[in-house]
Amino acid sequence: TLTSLNLMHFNLESLPSDISQLTMLEELNLAENRLLELTPAIGALTKLKRLIIKSNKLERLPSEIGALTQLEELDVSSNSLLHLPPSIGQLKKLRYLNVTDNSLEAFPVEMAGLKGLKYLDIKGNPLRFPIPRPVLDAGVDAVIAFLQDLLTGALTELNLGNHGITRLPEEVG
């Protein structure tokens, strides 16, 4: 049974929907290809623990990414992602998330539910601030609650890079 598949450097422009038949996969490396999109069929790989899609040309992730409930590591760095789907909040086992060097301006509010997240790297994105717009719109209490939810979980490393953030509210601790 195939549990690990490395398709790094294959110059892939797309991933066939037949990938959904590899239901026993626990690790999939699609790094350094030319993928413009990720097939929604990726959601059928429910045993995936590690998904590496760095250094492609992705502008979005399919909402089906939320079906990967066993996922512990997701690396989508060095793409052209404009946003993350709200379904990313369903990845309750996610410990490592690297979104470095994309085009992200904000995060979905559902990310506050990623209580197991230990490593989050967001540098190299044109973030207005790493807080979702609905949270910002709800006022300072909502911002503080969002940061407390994010920072009082398992998160031990947060790389903000050069975002011009000079201070966090005292309530964040």
Image (spheres, rainbow, N blue to C red):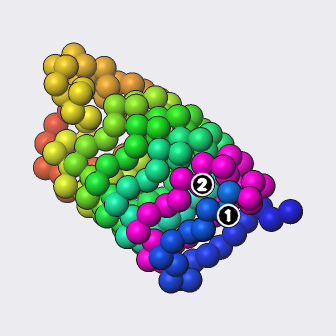
Inspect this view and state whether residue 1 appears: yes
In the displayed structure, would residue 109 be above or below residue 46?
above
Among the 4 quarters of the image, the one containing residue 8 = bottom right
Residue 112 position in % (x across, y down): 40, 30
Q: How far apart are marks 2 and 1 (CA)?
A: 8 Å
* Residue at the disc numbered 1: 18
Horizontal side of 60 relative to 88 (left or right) equals left
Taking the view exactly as shown, the residue that stands out farthest to the top is 141
In the image, residue 165 sits, relative to residue 92, either above or below, namely below
Q: Residue at x 66, y 49 (%)?
A: 44
Q: Magenta includes 30?
A: yes
Q: Which amino acid does label 1 sit on?
A: Asp
> Percent position (x, y) of residue 21?
74, 59
Q: Which residue does the image show at 16% across and 24% down from the upper left?
A: 137
Q: What crowding class fits label 1: few (fewer than 14 Cα within 10 Å), some (14-19), or many (20 or more)?
A: few
Residue 156 picture location, percent across and down: 45, 41
Q: In the rendered image, which residue does mark 2 sit on?
A: 41
| Kind of residue at disc 2 | Ala
Asked whether the beta carbons under mark 2 and mark 1 sit within 8 Å of each other, the answer is yes
Find numbered disc 1 in the image and state the secondary structure of the residue it sits on: helix
Which mark sits nearer the N-terminus, 2 or 1?
1
Q: Is residue 127 left or right of residue 9?
A: left
| Magenta-colored segment: predominant secondary structure | loop
| Residue range of the region highlighted in magenta in the rendering | 21-47
The image quarter in which residue 24 lies: bottom right
- Identify the secondary structure beneath mark 2: helix
**At 43% from the left edge and 53% from the top edge, which residue is drawn?**
61
Residue at 65% x, 73% y is 6
